[in-house]
Image (tube, rainbow, N blue to C red):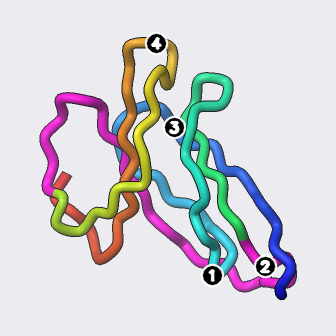
Amino acid sequence: MSTRRILKYPLQSKPGSVALTLPWGAQILHLDAQFGEPTLWISSDPQQRLPVDRKFVIFWTGQEFDDAQLQHIGTVPGCGTSEALVCHVFEIINGEPNL
């Protein structure tokens, strides 16, 4: 059995790309709103010191996009300054998608 640690990373609530430096081997556990902002919780090995850059992209409901290189992480209703705003977060899994 290995020891893990849960970390959180606040994201932006506006559409666009977000780059995060996460520990190597980080596993995404959950995406939800915290204090009105999309927030990503991950699990990682506390001994892991090797950083890995991972890229995410946020879309609002109604935006068109090419999902060929995207993996859906989650949807956050009520993110940002409006309860009606819904953010959809994807991880860029291979290269750069056409945004």
Q: Which of marks 3 and 2 is in front?
A: 2
Q: From the image, which quarter does the N terminus lie in?
A: bottom right
Image spot of residue 34 (x, y percent): 66, 31
SS type, badge 3: loop
Residue 88 to residue 68: above or below:
above
Badge 1 is on which residue?
A: 25
Which of the two marks, 3 or 1, is nearer to us in this view? 1
Residue that sits furthest to the front in the current view: 1
Q: To which residue does mark 4 refer?
A: 83
Give the mark nearest the N terminus, 3 or 1.
Answer: 3
For badge 2, the amino acid type reads: Asp
Residue at position x 86%, y 79% from top?
3
Mark 1, other Cα within 10 Å: few <14 / some 14–19 / many ≥20: some
Q: In which quarter of the image is residue 47?
A: bottom right
Are the residues tagged 4 and 3 within 8 Å (C-beta)? Answer: no
* Residue in the picture at 50% in, 69% down: 54
* Horizontal and vertical percent position of residue 87: 39, 33
Name the residue carrying label 3.
12
Task: Tell me the distance, in whole angstroms, between the alpha carbons under discs 1 and 2.
Answer: 8 Å
Question: Horizontal and vertical percent for residue 8?
Answer: 71, 51
Residue under label 2: 45
Q: What residue type is labelled 1?
A: Gly
Residue 54, magenta (yes or no): yes
Local crowd at mark 4 within 10 Å, few (<14), some, or many (≥20)?
Answer: few
Of the numbered discs 4 and 3, the one sitting upstream in the chain is 3
Name the residue at 33% across, 63% down: 71
Cα separation, mark 4 vs mark 3, equals 15 Å
User: Which region shows up in magenta?
Assistant: 44-66
